[in-house]
Image (cartoon, rainbow, N blue to C red):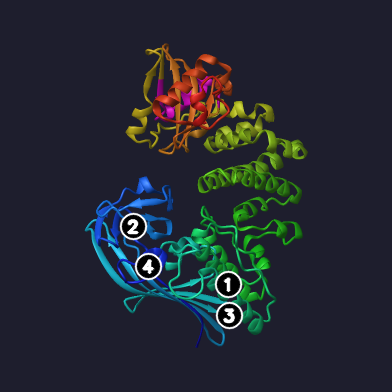
Amino acid sequence: MKIIEELKIGSYERYKSYFETGSPEVFISKKTGFCRYCETKFEFDEGRYYVNNYPVYSRMFCPICGHISLDSEIRYSSVEGKYLPYVVNLKILEMKSKVILKIEYRAIQIIGKLLEIKIFDVIEMYIFDIQNNNVIWKRYINKKLNDDLEIGYIIDYQKLMENTALWYFNIKHIVRKGTTLSQFLKRLRELVIKKEKNINGYTKKQVYISNISLRHKLFANVLNLAHKVRFWDSPNINYNDSFFYDKYLDKFEKNVYLLMKKDGLSYFKACFKTLSLPYTRNIKKQFDYKYIFLLQQIYTIENIDIANTIFKHYKTKIEITDSYIIKEEYLKNIQKEVKAVCFFYKLFILKIYTNLNLKFKQLLENKTNIIIDIMNLWHSANNKTKKNFIRHKIPFSKAHDWLSIEVSKQADQEIRFHISKNIMNRFNLYMMNTKFQCSCISKYSNLKYIARQMKNCSAGYKDRINNQLQLVAISDNTGKPKVLLEINQDSIVQAKLYRNVPVFKDNLLNNLVIEFAKKVKLKIKTDDISIKQDNNLKNIA
């Protein structure tokens, strides 16, 4: 075993600064902090300093001694009880058919409830088994094997974040002895590439990912390298600070790996076989981990031209909104929408409205909301309603309204929606001196009444209303519903009048909805409401 590279970070010398040794100056574990300088513990307001593991403020004051810590001087974990690295020694070791990244460090563990500090000796080993296309991550706590995982899969990001020392080091972190972390990472890459060529005969590949913040560039690149060792001909994984993966990927790549070993397939062919996709140049060109849920769902449609049209439509939606939408929630909504659109095509286009096949692209671009509403209503319809719909050959232009009315007439048993009392109390109020009453719809009978009175598709929300999504009806002093609001996670996403007319068509009701949003502190995320009349609302739209 040969040492190729070695570096040391940190020191036990109490008053040596971060810039001298790379030692963190304050340790944070969820809501408990520990200052290295005064060696005291304190409670930490995580909401003030951090959001999603990243500092809102770049400095922090110890409330005991007043010492100021900046950025990389702060060792932070959003989860209690993690092993926070203190003094660290990193080595790259070369064996005949393996490369090992070994990390030895003294770790601090903070137990918040007890305000207790514990010290551990930790050893991590990333074992790149080049000959067998395998990667193992092992972690020893006080010389006892605590973790032994096969890695090199896309899901490793979620599994290892905050569990490995690599998570906590900015690529430009100060090093006490040895080369920089950037050069250290480069030597690791070069050694793995050399081994892959000499042992497996693989051609040189680009294995470095640059489009990621400095904070986790080291962590992400080591994970990507592990993925390449397992799947050399795979694309690089574009891990980033908002990285999100579909839960389907948990088993997906393990099945791909087994297929590659069993049938001698390339990575792409094994992926396509696992996803039951046609192996075409066009789909291979579009292959990306963030589109796997699209590919899997859409290409169950046998008409490749239609499948390509749907894929292109939703790929564009994801790319356009990538920079400003909360990624995880947005992709979950896209998944639901894609599933509904594919089901709509297979049922309504192929079996009911066959004459619309050539117009499906226009439907997708201009009538997506109608398609989603129709599918929600269809799933809420009973067998009698579905049979009548098909028997009477309802024209597509009338399908939405016909289903809205018929579903609302169904004699279903009463259902109380799972909405907490504090949410209902928040939305149940009077406006304009009791001229209008706002009420959160809590029962199915109320939902059907609103659907009949307002001639809309709200009855199709029967299985969707919960603590995340609510419908609020605004009625006049005679009890007649005037406005229906869809509220999703503290945002108004739809605001409709009679027959789905947007609320901005009525100035009085438009202003009423704006006032309601202010009063109950809701964001406005819909074009149904005009906020031009109120400059203060532009900030929340």
Residue 531 image position (x, y, % from top left): 54, 23
- Tag 3–tag 2 contact (CB < 8 Å): no
Using residue 58 as the reference point, say whether residue 338 is left or right of it: right
Bin the neighbour count of mark 4 within 10 Å (Cα to Cα): few under 14, some 14-19, many 20 and up. many
Q: Secondary structure at mark 1?
A: helix
Bin the neighbour count of mark 2 within 10 Å (Cα to Cα): few under 14, some 14-19, many 20 and up. many
Q: Residue at x 67, y 58 (%)?
A: 287
- Tag 2–tag 1 contact (CB < 8 Å): no
Q: Secondary structure at mark 2?
A: strand
Sequence-wise first label, 1 or 3: 3
| Inter-mark Cα distance, 2 to 4 | 12 Å
Q: Which residue is mark 3?
A: 130
Q: Is residue 209 visible?
A: yes
| Inter-mark Cα distance, 4 to 1 | 22 Å
Q: Which residues are magenta?
A: 438-456
Bin the neighbour count of mark 1 within 10 Å (Cα to Cα): few under 14, some 14-19, many 20 and up. few
- Tag 4–tag 3 contact (CB < 8 Å): no
Using residue 431 as the reference point, say whether residue 272 is left or right of it: right
Q: Which residue is mark 4?
A: 85
Sequence-wise first label, 4 or 3: 4
Considering depth in this image, is 305 or 348 the residue closer to the camera?
305
Considering depth in this image, is 9 or 421 the residue closer to the camera?
9
Q: Amino acid at mark 4?
A: Pro
Select label 1 or label 3 by which is in front: 1
Residue 325 image position (x, y, % from top left): 55, 43
Select label 3 or label 2 by which is in front: 2
Residue 128 falls within the magenta-colored stretch: no
Q: Which residue is mark 2?
A: 28
Q: Which residue is mark 1?
A: 186
